[in-house]
Amino acid sequence: MSELREYQLVLADGEVFEGEGIGADPVDGIASGEVVFNTVLSGYQEVITDPSYAGQIITFTYPHIGNYGVNATDDEATRPHCRGVIIRDLARRHSNWRAEGHLDSFLRRHGIAGIAGIDTRRLTRHIRDSGAMPGAFGTADAAALRAAAEADPGTAGIDLVSTVTTDAPYTVGSGPRKVVAYDLGVKATMLRHLGELATVTVVPANTPAADVLAMNPDGVFLSNGPGDPEEAGSIVTELPKLIGEVPIFGICLGHQVLSLALGGRTFKMKFGHHGGNVPVQDARTGKVEITSQNHNFAVEIGSVPNVTETHTCLNDGALEGLVHNDLPAFSVQYHPEAGPGPHDSRYLFDQFAELMDSHGKAA
């Protein structure tokens, strides 16, 4: 841990919080982005390295962060894409047999600034009341920080997928099927689960449908990712060329772009779902799953034609899953791979395997 650096956090509406700097020094003394909160009790490394947080500053509601350190195995991407982190208390020492380093050193190595000592309960209540909004923190004065917060574009109407997707195709896994996975900001844990089912070719988000079909896959997977689904690039216009040709499974942003391709509508939520204990009910069975979630946009209920809406969030009634009535395509808003989070929903990967087998080339 280094010497104390006095920071301020200023939100776009003028709300001010005082704290101390952790991690890397912000460029020109200011780090800015859309401020959101995540309620997980553990898994801070997986959250920080989730590409879905591109453009955002993550507030951890759990007060004690960094106590078990970090390790290379738990990275969800090769580097973090978030704009910064906000915490109450950074552990001075880490203690865990898997630890390979301290969270503060991890943030410094990746150039991610953070602010600690914040009353995260007050900040979270403010976001819940006023909605997620841009903010800025650092050593600059309050006026400069507020100006930076007000100038930050947030995540609506912004193409963030192009900032996190892979530059070139690559292959993972050794399962018996063939899957093409669109990388919209894919997490490593998703690829590990898919790799048990199939040999997975991960492709950039702008890959044409014709190129995907030329690979003769058993299925197409649409990953999670950051930002506004309406600004996710060519994937929305290419998807209709794949729907009905090959089984499709979408998660999070993948759920949203599939819904758009089917004729549905999406909207930006007030403060989104970010946590590891969100209850979701399957309307077909009545079963309740505790899920991991991370999204600021959602699909409008009733807007997607010719589908069955399968899952609903019990906290606020948000649409959490759907399956097409005639074509082999389904998706969920939440994260069945967890990383971090509960494992209640991992059966969905098996359902994808069953869908591929029932609609396969030999079926």
Image (cartoon, rainbow, N blue to C red):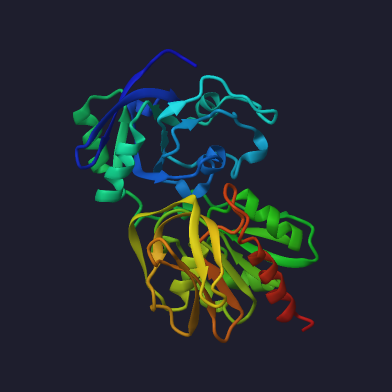
Q: Is residue 153 visible?
A: no
Left or right: residue 317 versus residue 81 is left
Count the marks: how many?
0
Between 218 and 205, the one lying in front of the other is: 218
Q: Residue at x 44, y 61 (%)?
A: 232
Q: Does 218 appear above or below 325?
A: above
Tell me the quarter of the image containing the C terminus: bottom right
Q: Is residue 357 visible?
A: yes
Q: Does 145 appear above or below 269?
A: above
Left or right: residue 107 versus residue 30 is right
Based on the displayed image, in which of its 4 quarters is residue 324 positioned? bottom right
Image coords of residue 101 (percent x, y): 62, 25
Q: Does 190 appear above or below 313?
A: above
Between 124 and 56, the one lying in front of the other is: 124
Image coords of residue 106 (percent x, y): 55, 28
Q: Residue at x 45, y 47 (%)?
A: 53
Image coords of residue 95 (percent x, y): 62, 24
Between 186 and 306, the one lying in front of the other is: 306
Taking the view exactly as shown, the residue that stands out farthest to the top is: 3
Left or right: residue 99 versus residue 139 is right
Image coords of residue 48 (percent x, y): 51, 40
